Amino acid sequence: MSLLTTSPAPATPGPAETATAFATMRVLTGRSMKHIFRSPDTIITVCLMPIAMMLLFVYVLGGAIQGSIPTQYGNYVTYQLPGILIITVASGVAYTALRVFTDRQQGIFSRLHTMPVSRSAALWAHVTTSVVANAISLAVVVLVALLIGFRTSAGLTQWLGAIGLLLLLTLALTWIAVIPGLTARSAETASAFSYPLIFLPFLSSAFVPTDTMPLVLRVFAEYQPVTAIVNAIRDLWGGQSVGSDVWVALAWLVGAIAVAWFFAVRAYRRTM
């Protein structure tokens, strides 16, 4: 007579476990947000560079560039604002990488792994904090842009579309930032990854039309993700019909989120 044994089915989180995970994430997100509000210089620093860059482009270079931009985009403030917002997010996620690195170095993750709480909550708390903090920075930059001449004919649907793209961008860059935060050996290395992200908008349609660029640079600029994202936001704010750029932008952003999330979770598991 043979005995048949079956292995138990893997447990799936039930409503109680899910509620506990959300409660833990809420507490940890509150902790991270308190750190930011107690040191508002973080958000101020993130906003200052893009605002200074925006003022430089508008008041120093804008007069020379204004004649080369398509008339449907209005003034140069409106034309270059999407690129400035991308730089704002790229600057902001550097602090996300630094916060993740600090928690790892101080043993916060290891301590949480020994407690009866959701292990993924700590990571999601950093991601949520990044999205909230960067949303505040973006709102500040848009407000300054409005003061110096940014105008839009977008309706509610177009505004929601532009905000959605900016939130997806923030989420994508945040998950990318988590990877160096979990793997870097120094704080400087953890935040240095953002430099190429800040530089990328300059090699796109963010500040000048791509048809004014040399051939090789124009080809790169037209097919890199920032150009599609910038053009999509520009069209939405211009109240124009959105072409293929929005779908290309969505494909880039969703793909970046999926790939970065995979490698971030893989790196996070190594810290357990």
Image (cartoon, rainbow, N blue to C red):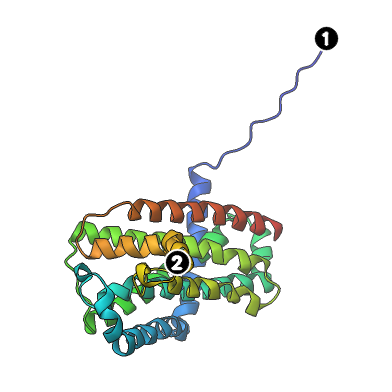
In this view, which residue lies farthest toward the top? 1
Along the line of sight, which residue is nearer the eye, 63 or 79? 63
Vertical arrangement, residue 101 with respect to residue 175, above or below: below
Pinpoint residue 38: horizontal percent, then vertical percent: 46, 83
What secondary structure is found at the residue carrying circle 1?
Answer: loop
Three-letter code for the amino acid on which mark 1 is drawn: Met
Q: Amino acid at mark 2?
A: Leu
For the residue pair 53 and 111, the one nearer the viewer reads as: 53
Say whether residue 88 is left or right of residue 192: left
Graded by Cα atoms within 10 Å as few (under 14), some (14 to 19) or many (20 or more), the crowding at tag 2 reads: few
| Quadrant (top left, top right, bottom left, bottom right) of the C terminus | bottom right
Q: Residue at x 42, y 68 (%)?
A: 204
- Residue that badge 1 annotates: 1
What numbered label is drawn on residue 215? Answer: 2
**Which residue is found at the position 68% from the left and 73% from the top?**
105
Q: Quadrant of residue 228?
A: bottom left
Which residue is nearer to you in this view: 94 or 73? Answer: 73
The quarter of the picture where residue 9 lies is: top right
> Residue 201: in sight, yes or no?
yes
The residue lying at 64 percent from left, 66 percent from top is 182
